[in-house]
Amino acid sequence: MLRRSYGVGSARATGYVAAVSVEPARDPDIAPIRDGVFFTLPDALPRGRHNLSREQVQDVQRERILIATTELLAARGYRGFGHADVARRAGVSLAAFYDCFAGKDECIFAGYDRFIAALVARLSAVDTDNNSRARSVEQLLGAYLDTLEADPVVARAYQVEIDALGPPARARRRVALNGIAEHLRQIARRIAPDADLPWSAFIGLVYAERQLAADLLDTDPEPSFAELRADMGAWLADVFRER
């Protein structure tokens, strides 16, 4: 993907593409995402005529829109912004916004899907070979908290503020958390196949971790998860020990 895109709006579809410059909004009260954790800031699209395809231009605009939506959701909550605010912050036209997304909700859910995909990828990268079951679960949940702390803006948007979208958000969250719990259960079964814990142990752990992290994000503008990680590590080692 192109990186660092600000200052360009919509584009024509064929041949040399002439990009229309739109000045992005700068609001010091809206914290930016951290590049490279969940989202990657695209490069600036070239001004004037260029050889980029419509799909390349739209990929850049889509990423910018997702980033802007996430930042606004974290800062203002679901009802605190609209399509025009997103377009202005992203530096794209409203036409470009609607080329990428049917509306604000679709954009938020696309951002949430990216958030979950990044978390799952981070958990999947944890090496649990030759570890005890308790140590493996502790490492996995620690990786989860470390990833949230790496970009609290994205974490706040999709751990706290997305709840305002109601039943569709809750349904998406159930699917995501059940998937993470199943990942934990499969690792635990591989490590200690004769010491099978009930499903409620894994899904309960994931929900507890998620809610404690959400509460911290909701109450602390600059959250540190070190204390939460240490507290949970102690009882995880007991609950998930081999018996």
Image (tube, rainbow, N blue to C red):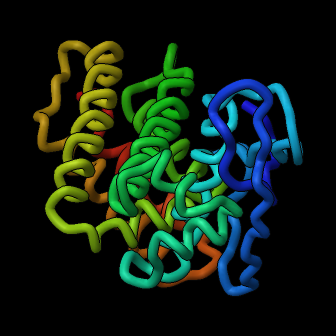
Visible residue check, residue 233? no
Residue under the image location 56 percent in, 24 percent down: 125
Numbered circles on residues, count: 0
- x then y, percent, for residue 44: 84, 47
Residue under the image location 75 percent in, 64 percent down: 22
Q: Relative to the observer, which residue lies in front, 65 or 136? A: 65
Residue 61 vertical position relative to residue 122 in the rendered view, above or below: below
- x then y, percent, for residue 19: 77, 47
Q: Relative to the observer, which residue lies in front, 77 or 85? A: 85
- x then y, percent, for residue 139: 51, 37
Q: On the picture, is 25 further left or further right than 191?
A: right
Residue 28 vertical position relative to residue 159 in the rendered view, above or below: below
- x then y, percent, for residue 173: 26, 51
Q: On the picture, is 51 further left or further right than 14?
A: right
Specify the quadrant that holds the C terminus.
Answer: top left
Residue under the image location 60 percent in, 50 percent down: 146
Specify the quadrant that holds the N terminus.
Answer: top right
Q: Relative to the observer, which residue lies in front, 134 or 5? A: 5
Residue under the image location 26 percent in, 68 percent down: 165
Visible residue check, residue 117? yes
